Amino acid sequence: MSTISLTRRQGLALGAASLFALGSKGVNAQGQAELTFWSVRLNTPELQAALLPLLDQFMAENPGIKITNEPVSGEQVYPKFIAAVQGQQMPDIAEAYSYHPLQFAALDQMETMDDIIAEWEQEGRLADIVNEFAYRKFFWQDHYWGVPYNLDPRAIYYRKDLLEATGLTPPTNWDELQAAAIAMHDPANGVAGIGFPAGDFHITQHFYMGFMFQAGGSILNKDGQLVFGTEAKDANVQALTYLTDFATKLKVTPDGIAAWNTDDAHTAFVQGRLAMGMGTGRVVGQIMRENPDLFDKVGILETLQGPKAKLTAGFYNPMFIWKFSPNIDAAKTFVRWFVSPGRLAPIYAANPGQHWPIFKSEFDTEFNRSNPLLMEMLTKVIPYTTDFAYPGTGIPEMGVIDGEKMFAAPVNEVVVGAKTPEQAVVDAHKRMEEVFLGG
Amino acid sequence: MLQRQRARLAYYLVLPAMTLVVVLNLLPLLQGLVISMQSQNLIRPNPTGFVGFRHYVRALTQDVDFWSSAWHSVYFTACAVAGAYVLSLGLALLLNLDIKGRGLFRALFLIPWVVPDVVTALLWKWFYSDQWGFANFALVKLGLVGAAIPWLSDPKMAMPAVIIVQIWKLYPIMTVVLLAALQSVPKELIEAAKIDGAGPFQRFWYVTANFLRPTSMVIVLLACIWTFQSFDIIYLLTGGGPANATQTLPILVYVKAFWASQLGYASAIGVLILLILMVLGFLNLGLERALSRGRDAHV
């Protein structure tokens, strides 16, 4: 049996080294790399219940890394992150809204994710992502600043029983949607033809964005230049007119939609007050929990063929890493692990429909096959989802345009009769221009 | 000598409190002032670059949102405080009467004050809902209106609707304070006025109101400050909409700071809010002094 003897000097040196290791930033007393992980999109109780065992599993498989999750409320996202940037107390890893990585990259706070994207490309996983804009929107100044990890789609739900009673088939284009909304509008029985959030909230612009893309419009062009009220103005006005006509001209929506946020539209549909309702994927789980009798009577419309395109809005949420994290390698290890195939199945199951995989190869699961609404979402909506940056790559200014709800305002203003669609688009464009000019 | 020692001791005694005031109040205020003169546009390089009064000029001369938000703030504050004052004065006068269950009523009237703002906003949002709100349900059932009123989705109705909520939130504390002031009115004076033949209105106007005035000035000033800087109730009820009809200055600050990443500009608006409130405070103080002088001269 051999023994190791140390001189006093060696002992002191070892002691000092140990103290240094213990005191090193980002390493705990057990020598583990410590990571903080802020989650913005996974912060409800059911999603947290699905997330935390995943983190335990990661730590069991990677004993050298300790990860601590902190859920962040959606309303607190910007105050919390901005305070963290100012105080240089950013989390090592975060998952949040679409434009966060670019905004923080503009502040020189983000680690590039080029290596992970390159790996995905080599492994063929990049080609497996539903839509190239899922990752292109994180590309700015020759680098990827985030990687997508899940998808949050927008869809139009409809009441199959009410539609059948009219003798119409499920709408597939703008004219048919309008005809169906008129035909199913039945205020005497407390059912409006269609409902969508038109309040001064972020969700409002998500639905406008879908119609905008369908009309051939956009906010930016493929070079990242603002075209909302210039080259794309006609298409954007056309989309705005079409969407708001449901409320102002056809009067087939509930009167109060100009104050509606996401949950108002969801609840109205789930309570049976809407024949058709625009909502997030979360509606599927909400119907299952709150009004299961409605489940078999509900369908999801095929993404509409607009005048120019068949597209809808979907948000590919990112994960990103703080540039000054003392444990960047460990953080990337976690991101690779977290976004690996099949990993997030418990999260998808926690609230059916709310979160979706970004990889096509993950769609064919028993969980999806066993749920008709999920299958409809999968076949009729998800393949047509695209994101803000369409048809280009991302820019930090888009985060401000989205954050300030600059293209929700036109919907709200037209629905309440404060502006014409054209005026609303022109005014919104002016506000967007100011973002590009600075200030 | 002894007096000087006493004075020194007094300074030592207030030192901890002053230190706290400096650290917790003045330093953040100074930092806010500094940030308001820096670029602090978080999507632009060099956020700490000095820009002088550029943000102030932008707010006062270029940003239409600033002036419309300022007007909304003034309108919201004036209506909510006036409404709450009238309501609370009436309630305080009633609760000052020797009625059965007075203690219970006083406790019940305090409920809105203890409800957190977020809960208040959500309760009223449901109450106002055009789909399932009790307000519309009751009005329609009673035949007072033919169809649901779009309380929060009509730009003309939204501001009155949020003002009602703010009145609901304010009146309890105003009632308590006014009631305390009412109870300090000497009964002998009221009796003397009665003997002199003063009617109820004259007794209120010439005796009670004089005693209420200083308290009223203070509570109105405080209510104005609370209301002017109120954020969460309006934000949760309307988000500042519809069509910006309820966007007040605090909401504009929030939007500019945290959604538009323009911390410098938002700080400048914050400083302007502070200046507006200081002017309001000085006006209140001046008015109180003028009224006191008038009262003294009258006496």
Image (spheres, grey):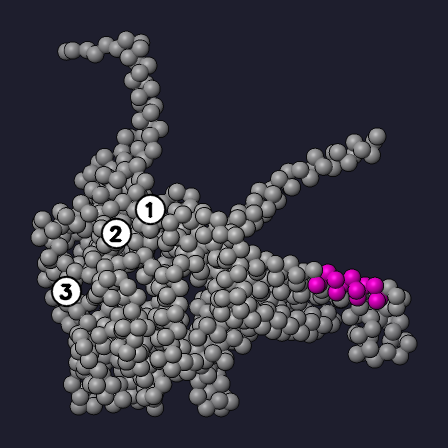
Quarter where residue A358 is shown: bottom left
* Dot label at residue A141: 2
Task: Establish if A26 lies above or below A249.
Answer: above
Kindly check if marks 1 and 3 are in contact, taking CB atoms under 8 A apart as contact: no
Kindly check if marks 2 and 3 are in contact, taking CB atoms under 8 A apart as contact: no
Q: Residues within 10 Å of mark 3 (few under 14, many from 20)?
A: many
Nearer the observer, A18 or B187:
A18
Quarter where residue A77 is shown: bottom left
> Dot 1 falls on which chain?
A
Decide if residue A101 is on the left or right side of residue B264.
left
Nearer the observer, A239 or A336:
A239
Kindly report the distance in space between the C-alpha atoms of the residues bearing marks 2 and 1. Answer: 12 Å
Q: Secondary structure at mark 1?
A: loop
Residue drawn at 17 percent across, 74 percent down: A310
Question: Image quadrant for the C terminus of chain B?
Answer: bottom right
Q: Which residue is mark 3?
A: A368
Q: Which residue is mark 1?
A: A108
Q: Amino acid at mark 2?
A: Gln
Question: Image quadrant for the N terminus of chain B?
Answer: top right
Front: mark 2 or 3: 2
Which percent across, then down, holds residue A405? 37, 67
Q: Main secondary structure of the magenta part?
A: helix
Q: Amino acid at mark 3?
A: Asn
Which percent across, then down, holds residue B36? 51, 53
Q: Secondary structure at mark 3?
A: helix
